[in-house]
Image (tube, grey):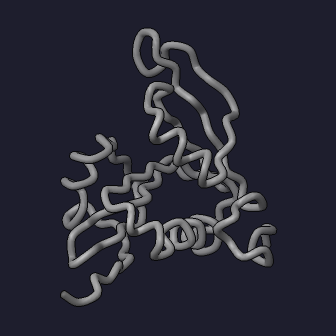
Amino acid sequence: MGIRMIQFTPFTFNAHGKWIKNTIQCVFCDDTNGIVALRDGKPVAACICDNWTDTSVNVHFVIEDKMVLRHGLFEEFAYWVYITCGRDLMIGNVAADNVKALKLDKHIGFQELARIPDAYKQGVDVVLLTLHRKDCKYLPEELREAA
């Protein structure tokens, strides 16, 4: 059994759209873009972005294979969003009852900014999270400051 490599590739609707819709129920917008991690040619993780502004972007993460974390998943995502795409802020919206997603996002470095009561469904808030480029531990320190 050989080494199973992780490969990062740009998100495309044709190649990855169905998988994304089945894993995170993402509603695609005209500006939806992202990066997908492949293992043996199959998608196992992704960072999907939409609602781009001059300084920020909404992000959606999906991770089906935790081994991608050891292969630079978040370093790849951070470099792509902050450096390649030139944004200074990632924004996430997570249902308050999605404990695993909130734990992961906070581990990555996202900070809770606000909660919107009953915004996901009755009795379940939406948690608004942010991660500024200057605070992203997955970027080398010299790249954390905006150009």
Q: Position of residue 52 (x, y in %)?
A: 55, 52
Q: Position of residue 50 (x, y in %)?
A: 46, 50
Q: Residue at x 27, y 82 (%)?
A: 4
Q: Dividing the picture into quarters, in which one does residue 54 lie?
A: bottom right
Outermost residue to the top? 122
Above-or-below relation of 9 to 47: below
Q: Position of residue 57 (x, y in %)?
A: 57, 51
Q: Nearer the viewer, residue 128 or 56?
A: 128
Q: Residue at x 52, y 48 (%)?
A: 104
Outermost residue to the bottom? 2
Q: Dividing the picture into quarters, in which one does residue 33 lie?
A: bottom left
Above-or-below relation of 94 to 84: above
Left or right placement of residue 19 versus residue 121 in this view = left
Q: Position of residue 142 (x, y in %)?
A: 79, 78
* Image quarter in which the C terminus is found: bottom right
Q: Residue at x 18, y 87 (%)?
A: 1
Q: Residue at x 67, y 53 (%)?
A: 89
Outermost residue to the front? 1
Number of labels in the image equals 0
